[in-house]
Structures are given as C-alpha cells and as structure tokens.
C-alpha cells in the first residue's frame, strides 16, 4: 500500500476539522437567534434607528443589517464548506482557509465599525477578544495544515 493511499480519507486530524465544520453552522444559527431575535422583537431596533431617540445613531441600521447579512452569508458558506469536505472536493482547502481568514478579518472590522457607533466603548470587549483569539488559534493551526498536509493533498482530489 502506498503512503498516499494510506493517508487518503477523512481520518487523522481531519476528524477535528470535520467536527469544527459541523459545529460552525450550529454556532452561527445560535448566535443569530440569540442576538438578532432580541433586537427585532424587544423594541431595540426602533430605539436605535429612530431619529430623535437618545440611543439613535444613523450607523446602527446599516451596521446591524450588515452584521446579520454577513452572518447569514457565513452560515451558507459553512454549509457549502461542509459539502466540499464530505464529498472530498479539491476546492475544500482553499474555501476552508478563506473562511478562517475572512472570519478573523470580520471580527476586527466589525469591532472597529462598532466603535464608530459607540465611541465611548472599548473596541474589544471580553467576548470579542475571546472570539478573536479562538479564530486566530484556529487559523494558526489549520491554515498551515491545509497547505502542507499530505492527508489533505491525498483526500481532496475530486
């Protein structure tokens, strides 16, 4: 049996990648429901986006809608990445690397955008720092793995 043949398949460290791929859409759905259902049902949207209210800022509406749209886009992208992963498509490593790096950049950009709406608040709160560190560690581990792993090269060939 050749070494490449023994490394073929969704085994080894790819099991952890697969677990993350399955959990990521679930985390996003939970986040969307937890965050945006409250904003749109408890009156926060009106308070934040109606001129004349104390909390009004003209950037709230585009920021909230943009965040929601990007999170829905991330959800759909993770579902597509799961398809690429489980069908062992050649495009998988590139899409996986792209989503990891995009998520890292999105956390930074979103935090800076939030600073323009809430200038007196810190750019990075504890939850944002934790999410950024989690994404950074994942990127530092999985991007090089996708680029150099013999198993990745032998598995994603379709």
Image: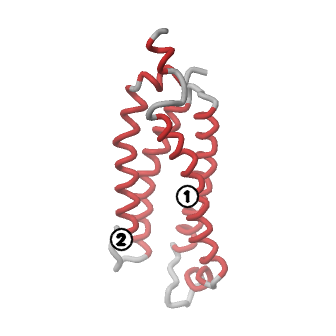
Q: Residue placed at 55% from the left, 58% from the top?
A: 27
Q: N-terminal of the two: label 2 or label 1?
A: 1
Residue tagged by mark 2?
125
Q: CA distance from mark 2 to mark 1?
A: 19 Å
- Tell me the crowding category of disc 2: few under 14, some 14 to 19, or many 20 or more residues within 10 angstroms, Cα based: few
Estimate the x, y position of residue 147 in percent, counting from the top left.
40, 28
Estimate the x, y position of residue 19 in percent, counting from the top left.
53, 44
Q: Residue furthest top?
A: 1
Estimate the x, y position of residue 50 in percent, counting from the top left.
60, 84
Q: Is residue 66 left or right of residue 7?
A: right
Q: Residue 27 — which label? A: 1
Q: Residue placed at 59% from the left, 28% from the top?
A: 88
Query: In front: 146, or 125?
Result: 146
**Would you identify the image quadrant in which residue 141 lies?**
top left
The kind of secondary structure element at disc 2 is loop
Query: In front: 128, or 150?
Result: 150
Q: Residue placed at 47% from the left, 41% from the top?
A: 16
**Would you identify the image quadrant in which residue 128 lies?**
bottom left
Q: Quick one: quadrant of the C terminus?
A: top right
**Would you identify the image quadrant in which residue 116 lies?**
bottom left
Q: Residue placed at 40% from the left, 26% from the top?
A: 149
Q: Is residue 56 left or right of residue 130?
A: right
């Amino acid at each position: 049996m050749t070494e490449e043949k023994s490394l073929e398949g969704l085994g080894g460290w790819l099991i952890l990648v697969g677990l993350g791929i399955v959990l990521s859409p679930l985390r996003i759905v939970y986040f969307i429901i937890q965050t945006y259902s409250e904003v749109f049902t408890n009156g926060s949207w009106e308070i934040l986006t109606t001129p004349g209210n104390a909390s009004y800022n003209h950037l709230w509406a585009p920021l909230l809608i943009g965040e929601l749209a990007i999170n829905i886009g991330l959800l759909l992208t993770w579902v597509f990445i799961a398809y690429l992963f489980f069908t062992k498509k050649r495009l998988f490593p590139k899409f996986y690397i792209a989503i990891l790096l995009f998520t890292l950049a999105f956390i930074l950009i979103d935090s800076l955008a939030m600073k323009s709406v809430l200038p007196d608040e810190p750019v990075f709160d504890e939850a944002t720092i934790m999410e950024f560190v989690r994404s950074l560690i994942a990127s530092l581990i999985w991007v090089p793995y996708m680029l150099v792993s013999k198993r990745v090269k032998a598995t994603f060939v379709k």
